[in-house]
Image (tube, rainbow, N blue to C red):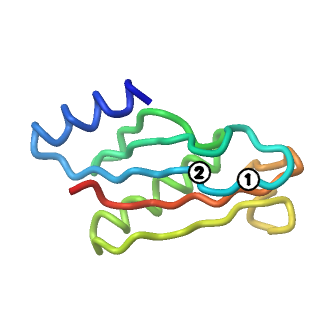
Amino acid sequence: MRQVLKEIEGWKRQGSGVALATVVKVWGSAPRPLGSKMAIRDDGEMVGSVSGGCVEAAVCQEAKGVLVSGEPRLLRYGVADEEAWSLGLSCGGEIEVFIEKVA
């Protein structure tokens, strides 16, 4: 978490837009625990982790929308979703990720 905060501070000092993604719910097996965080800069640079591979790419895309609109989003990925399999969340669990713009 300290590394994520350090990067956010640096990016904000540079004038970059930053979104913060946080795992807010976990059901069953998941790649990252509750409270895991990932910061996403407006150019797509990321630090931290909320899941694995393709799920993080999807979260990054959603974060770009949050940076444009300023509206937070709550995303859910799990094995029950056809999209989750295609995104790579095949660990048998489900996660919810909250994305917000960092002021």
- Of residues 9 and 85, the one drawn nearer to the viewer in this rendering: 9
* Rendered location of residue 2, percent (x, y): 38, 26
Mark 2: which amino acid? Val
Residue at 52% across, 55% down: 59
Disc 1 target residue: 26
Question: Looking at the image, which residue is at 28% across and 28% down?
Answer: 6
Is 45 on the left-hand or right-hand side of 30?
Answer: left
Q: Residues within 10 Å of mark 1 (few under 14, many from 20)?
A: many
Hey, which quadrant is residue 14 in on the image?
A: top left
Residue 91 position within the rendered picture, expressed as x and y whole percent measured from the top left? 85, 44
Q: Quadrant of the C terminus?
A: bottom left
The location of residue 10, given as percent across then percent down, is 19, 31
Disc 2 element = strand
Q: Are marks 1 and 2 in contact (CB under 8 Å)?
A: yes
Residue 99 image point, x, y percent: 45, 60
Is residue 24 or residue 40 the one in the foreground? 24
Secondary element at image label 1? strand
Disc 1/disc 2 C-alpha distance (Å): 7 Å
Counting the numbered discs, the total is 2
Q: Amino acid at mark 1?
A: Val
Q: Which residue is mark 2?
A: 23
Q: Nearer the viewer, residue 48 or 58?
A: 48
The image's mark for residue 53 is none
Q: Residue at x 68, y 39 (%)?
A: 33
Which quarter of the rendered picture does the N terminus lie within? top left
Q: In the picture provided, is 21 more to the left or to the right than 94?
A: left
Position of residue 53 relative to residue 103, above or below, is above
Q: Residue at x 86, y 67 (%)?
A: 80
Horizontal relation, residue 95 to residue 41: left or right: right
Please rate how many residues cluster around mark 2, counting C-alpha atoms within 10 Å: few if below 14, some from 14 to 19, many from 20: many
Q: Residue furthest top?
A: 3
Quarter occupied by residue 4: top left
